[in-house]
Image (tube, coloured by chain):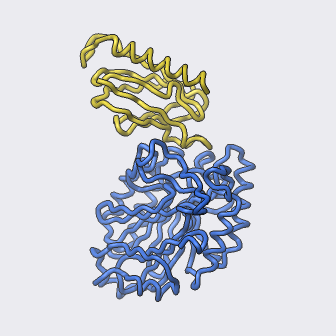
């Protein structure tokens, strides 16, 4: 039993580039042979912050999202679906401007070839109005869906501005999990880390421990999230956590700088530190193959 | 900006003088709390730099002027919700020296990420 390797992933996704294989050797897959699990991959985009202005961080803030859309459309094989893990828009206190940005965001991503798109909010989208505008434009902030044998759980840890999931959603999560076998695959999609990555920079979810307690009995749980504007991989117990790059500006590694300020734009290497990823699974292999992509091909 | 820097420096200096100048032992049974008054508003704390003495109990009295804010200093094990218009008392007994960041952990708008400060704990 081994994790999916580069060849497996390339065969599935029909693409080239760098592959990170998550080390999930502990996962049992024997029982999955009886499940409906099929090979597939999806694409994760995160922290697009449409509406952000800051030429020192990104002089192409009005054009980066469009380039990402073109890059996804340029994949040799198209994913089954696409997820946006929050901070679709940059925050504004003006409710009309907030909705304008969400409308513009939707117009831009309407150019994606893949129309099966899943959204969740970041604090920039939802924390100032408890998710009201987000729900008008993108629907529910927490929900589940089943795709080819994998249970996807979308958690909202931002509509409450205290960065909490909250008791109501925790109860809902507990009920949802009751319908899932311990050995089935679960992917959690959310915006903020579900562990104390670096609370000094507010890189945490206040009641994350309660979420993890609910998920821990399950053998095969992986979390994909955003918020920290960089690739990051971490394990808590038997749960793996993978943070995605941003599509507006990168942030420093946790605690590596005096302040959590955007890394300045590098004119010698434009779009450096930005990107998106694909995540592939296969019926007979544990874990997921994660491939990171730049915004423009020349950066690969 | 220059004026603000001077003001913060003066406040910090005064606080340091007040706290260190007391020569208080680590415990203050029967003595009134040392109080540090602070304000919080989008997107700053005032003062943004606080100097404390290791082992000396202090109460931060923080008033949120414009909306709900948070006060979080994980390295010193402190956090509190700051209700608008109310004085929130946050007791602190720093047990280690160093410079420790605090920040707002309740999202308050564009600039929230910059709403931070530093607690300096000296021997």
Asked if residue B110 shows in the view, the reply is: yes
**Quarter residue A21 falls in:** bottom left
Give the total of numbered labels. Answer: 0
From the viewer's side, name the closer residue of A144 and B63.
B63
Q: Position of residue B69 (x, y in %)?
A: 53, 35
Q: Position of residue A224 (x, y in %)?
A: 46, 65
Quadrant for the N terminus of chain B in the image: top right
**Quarter residue A212 falls in:** bottom left
Q: Residue at x 74, y 55 (%)?
A: A100
Chain B image colour:
yellow
From the viewer's side, name the closer residue of A283 and A288.
A288
Q: Where is residue A78 in the image (x, y as percent from the top left)?
A: 58, 82
Q: Residue at x 54, y 19 (%)?
A: B7
Chain A image colour:
blue
The residue most toward the front is A268
Q: Residue at x 53, y 56 (%)?
A: A250
Asked if residue A121 shows in the view, the reply is: no
Q: Where is residue A185 in the image (x, y as percent from the top left)?
A: 39, 75
In the image, residue A282 above or below residue A256: below
In the image, residue A240 above or below residue B62: below
Using residue A195 as the reference point, say whether residue B30 is left or right of it.
Answer: left
């Amino acid at each position: 039993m081994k994790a999916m390797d580069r060849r497996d992933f390339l065969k599935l996704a029909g693409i080239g580039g760098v592959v990170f294989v998550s080390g999930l050797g502990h996962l049992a897959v024997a029982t999955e042979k009886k499940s409906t699990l099929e090979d597939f991959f999806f694409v994760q985009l995160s922290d697009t912050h449409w509406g952000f202005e800051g030429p020192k961080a990104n002089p192409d803030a009005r054009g980066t999202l469009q380039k990402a859309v073109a890059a996804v459309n340029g994949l040799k094989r198209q994913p089954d679906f696409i997820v946006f893990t929050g901070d679709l828009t940059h925050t504004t206190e003006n409710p009309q401007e907030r909705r304008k940005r969400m409308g513009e965001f939707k117009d831009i991503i309407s150019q994606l070839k893949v129309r099966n798109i899943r959204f969740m909010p970041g604090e920039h989208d939802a924390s100032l109005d408890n998710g009201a505008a987000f729900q008008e434009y993108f629907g529910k902030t927490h929900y589940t869906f089943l795709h080819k044998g994998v249970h996807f759980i979308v958690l909202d840890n931002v509509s409450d501005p205290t960065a909490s999931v909250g008791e109501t959603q925790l109860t809902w999560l507990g009920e949802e999990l009751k319908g899932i076998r311990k050995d089935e695959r679960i992917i959690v999609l959310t915006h903020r880390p579900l562990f104390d990555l670096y609370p000094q920079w507010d890189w945490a979810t206040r009641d994350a421990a309660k979420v993890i307690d609910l998920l821990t009995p399950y053998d095969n749980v992986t979390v994909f999230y955003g918020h920290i504007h960089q690739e990051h991989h971490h394990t808590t117990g038997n749960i793996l956590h993978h943070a995605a790059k941003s599509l507006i500006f990168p942030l420093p590694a946790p605690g590596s700088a005096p302040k959590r300020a955007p890394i300045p734009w590098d004119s010698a290497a434009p779009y450096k530190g930005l990107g998106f990823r694909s995540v592939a699974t296969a019926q007979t292999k544990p874990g997921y193959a994660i491939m990171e992509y730049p915004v423009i091909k020349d950066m690969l | 900006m220059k004026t603000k820097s001077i003001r913060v420096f003066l406040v910090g200096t005064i606080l340091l003088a007040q706290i260190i100048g007391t020569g208080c032992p680590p415990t203050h049974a029967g003595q009134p709390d040392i109080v540090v008054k602070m304000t919080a508003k989008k997107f700053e704390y005032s003062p943004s730099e606080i100097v404390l003495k290791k082992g000396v109990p202090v109460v931060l009295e923080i008033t949120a002027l414009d909306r709900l804010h948070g006060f979080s200093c994980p390295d010193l094990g402190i956090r509190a919700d700051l209700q608008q218009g109310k004085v929130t008392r946050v007791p602190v007994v720093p047990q280690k020296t160093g410079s420790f960041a605090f920040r707002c952990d309740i999202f308050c708008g564009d600039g929230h990420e910059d709403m931070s400060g530093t607690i300096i704990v000296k021997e």
